[in-house]
Image (spheres, rainbow, N blue to C red):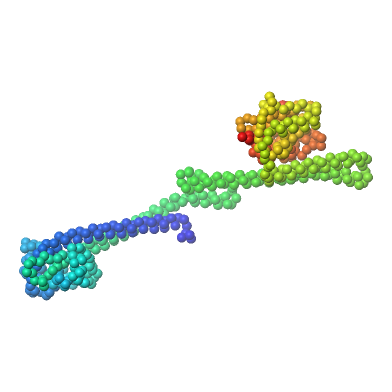
Amino acid sequence: MARFSLRTRLLVLALLLVTTGLVVSDTLVLGTVRRQLVERADVQLTRFAEPLAKRNPGRIAQQGGQPGQAPGPGQQGPFGQLGPLGQVNRRAGLALPSQYVVQYLGADGAVQTVLRQPIADSDPAPEVTGLTPDTLTARKGRAFTVPELPDGGSWRVLVLPLQRTAGSDFSAPAYVLVAVSLSDVDAVIERMRITFLTIGGVVLAGIAVLGAFAVRAGLRPLRRIEQGAARIASGELSHRMPELGGRTEVGRLSTALNGMLSQIEAAFAARAASEARMRRFVADASHELRTPLAGIRGFAELYRMGALPDVDRAMDRIESEAVRMGRLVEDLLTLARLDEERPLALAPMDLRTLAADALHDLTALDPGRPVSLTGPDGTGAPQPAPVLGDEARLRQVVTNLVGNAVKHTPAGTPVRIGVGARGGQCLLEVADHGPGLTEDQAALVFERFYRVDASRSRKDGGGAGLGLAIASALVRAHGGTISLESEPGRGAAFRVELPHQR
């Protein structure tokens, strides 16, 4: 069956189920009808046999006939005066229908007399063999079926004991056997069987035709999905399956496939964007490393050529470029570790401690710059901000944000560090009153190697534009968010939100 199409298999399965149902139902109906007809025949047997069992058959003369044949017309039989063809005269007694046979049996089961209206010379009487006294005793009063020879027909037989009178001859019949042919029953069953076969054939043919159309119509949506899948396999990832509703299995399949395709397309887009960022990252990192390396190489060549007028100054420049290159390499390693999602050394801590340490460090490095430690709204004292974090990494976040504020604002510009909790989140805010950023600049400020302009990024040796990118990656690794609010001329405020530790 696996070699055939789904349409063919469904149709064959439906036909097999219908055929099985028809066979089972027809068999049950035919069996029930036959049983009822046989039961009706048993009732008729009893109705005919009981009067015979109550009469004394007397002696049956062999006049004009041979043993085993019915008496001729006008002869006296056990049922009264016989009419033409040996039929019992209804006025004289009981009537014996043509499909009945009566046999008188001795006590040993031997047939003594047969009374039957013959239908034809070749019409045989039923042969009941093996009727021993024990068998007669066991079967008397209960109808049973015997085959008719030679054509294989069957007869329904009932044996009843005859009522003996005082002084009866022991050689006289002891049992009366009444049999009725089941040919009429068999004919009815055969006609019903032929009718059922005809009707079943017509029904199967109709179901085959209608089923073919129904299966074809039912599988049409699946065919559309197959065609859509072929288009997607050819590279058309933007194609979507037809919307077929969620009430059918095919409709739910279509919806699920569309969801999967959207995820796949998004994954491909994310992969392409990641590859683009990686290429840009490698290019920017190469450029940033090339600059200090070129400076160090240039000073080394001048020194080797003896063309350095001031060796000490050249050594200072070489050292500063090496330090700058070391910071860049360290930042790149930090970003690489964050991209690998290495586990953090998490422990309970309070953001107020980090903010206070950053305030003291900034005061020591730039005594002339006003620095304040407040609540998250810029007023009041700092509030408790318990979080579960990696202290070294979060300290790096605060250091980068404070260093960014100092590096990109004029000397003496106030800096505020706010700490507190709000709405299930712990907040840390670093705000300055510097020149601020435009909306486009603010959207790119957390990108790697992004610098607003050369004059602001190269102050005191400059930077590679990785500080805010590292801060953003560290905050995300802690399950938090970092945002920027800034307008030109109104300064910038970086806000970090981390989950509150309960």
Residue 416 in view here: yes
- For the point 14% across and 63% down, the residue is 49
- For the point 61% across and 32% down, the residue is 424
Which quadrant of the figure has residue 200? bottom left
Which quadrant of the figure has residue 401? top right
Does 297 appear above or below 374?
Answer: below
Q: Residue 77: horizontal and vertical position, in percent?
A: 8, 68
Q: Residue 439: horizontal and vertical position, in percent?
A: 69, 32
> Between 311 and 267, which is closer to the camera in this rendering?
311
> Between 257 and 180, which is closer to the camera in this rendering?
180
Is 299 on the left-hand or right-hand side of 172? right
- For the point 57% across and 46% down, the residue is 261
Does 422 appear above or below 213?
Answer: above
Quadrant of the snapshot with the C terminus: top right
Residue 495 in view here: no
Q: Residue 50: horizontal and vertical position, in percent?
A: 13, 62
